[in-house]
Image (tube, rainbow, N blue to C red):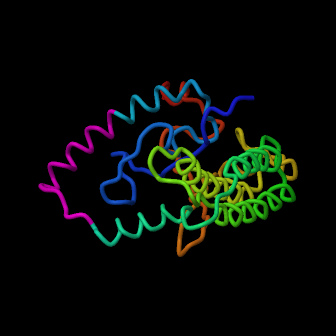
Amino acid sequence: PTAHYMMGGVVFDQACATEIHGLFAAGEDTGGVHGANRLGGKGVANSTVFGGVAGDSMARFVKSEGKFRKPDEAAITAAEVRCRRPFERAGGDVSSVREALHSLMWEQAGIIRDRELLSRAAQGLTALETELAGTGLGGMGAEFNLAWHDWLNLESLILVSRAIVIAALGRENSRGAHYRSDFTTPGDFDHSCYTTVRYRDGGLVSATEAVRFTRVRPGESLLADDAR
C-alpha cells in the first residue's frame, strides 16, 4: 500500500480560515473534506478548489487589515532559542531516531490497529521524543546544515505521530481507512463524529465533534434526493 498523505489535517472554515488569526489552509494539509475516504486522486481537486477559495479569502483579509502589524520580537526570540537547542548538545545520530519512528508507526499504528499496539506506540513515541531531545548537533554550524533541518522536521513528525495515535485510541470502531481489529464494526452512523486534537499547555488533548450532515446521510442516495 502507498501512503498518499495523512488522513485529516488543520480544521478550517468555508473561507479556509483557521483558528489562528491570519492563517489560512487549503488542500492536503486540511481535514474534514473527504472524511474517512481520502484517495490520492482527490488531492488535486482538493488543492485546486480550496486553493482558489483560500486565495480569494486571503485577498479580502489583507484589504480588511489595512496595514502590516509590528512583529512580536519576544516570540521571534523565543522561536530562535527553541530552534537552536540542538547545537547546545553533543552530536548524535538523527537518522537512527527517524528510522525508529518510521518503524514504530508502521508496525504499531499502521493499517490494522488495536489498543495494545497503539498503547505501545504511545509509549514508544514518548521514548523517541526523549531520545531526540538528547540528540544534538554540537560542533556543527547552522549554515547549509541539512541535519538541522532533519532534527526540526523530526520533532514535528513525532508530535504529529502522537496526534495520530491519540485519535486512533479514542475511536473504538472501524470506518474507511481506520481499522481496529478489536472494534471491527463501524458503529452507529446516526452518531457519527470526527476527532480533533489540540495542543494545550504542553500536551495534546483530543475531543470528538458530531458530523453535520447537510446534503445526504449515511445510507441515503443523492439521486433519490435530487428526484424529490
Q: Residue at x 78, y 57 (%)?
A: 121
Left or right, 38 with reference to 55: right
Residue at 50% from the left image edge and 38% from the top image edge: 28
Instruction: Out of 208 and 53, give the one closest to the viewer.
Output: 53
Above or below, comparing residue 181 to residue 200 in the picture: above
Q: Is residue 45 magenta?
A: no
Q: Residue furthest front?
A: 139
| Quarter occupied by residue 14 | top left
How many dots with numbers? 0
Q: Along the line of sight, which residue is nearer the eye, 2 or 182?
A: 2
| 61 to the left or right of 159 | left
| Image position, residue 207 (x, y; %) | 60, 64
Q: Position of residue 33 (x, y in %)?
A: 51, 40
Q: Is residue 48 left or right of residue 170?
A: left
Residue 20 picture quarter: bottom left
Q: Residue at x 57, y 24 (%)?
A: 41
Residue found 64% across the figure and 65% down from its top: 133
State yes or no: residue 64 in magenta.
yes
In the rendered image, residue 187, in percent from the top left (x then y), is placed at: 75, 50
Q: Give 101 or 16, whichever is nearer the viewer.
A: 101
Chief SS of the magenta region: helix
The boundaries of the magenta stretch are 52-71
Most extreme residue toward the bottom, as rendered?
Answer: 201
The relative height of residue 58 versus residue 45 in the rendered view (above or below) is below
Q: Quadrant of the N terminus?
A: top right
Question: In terms of depth relative to the viewer, which is nearer, 2 or 125?
Answer: 125
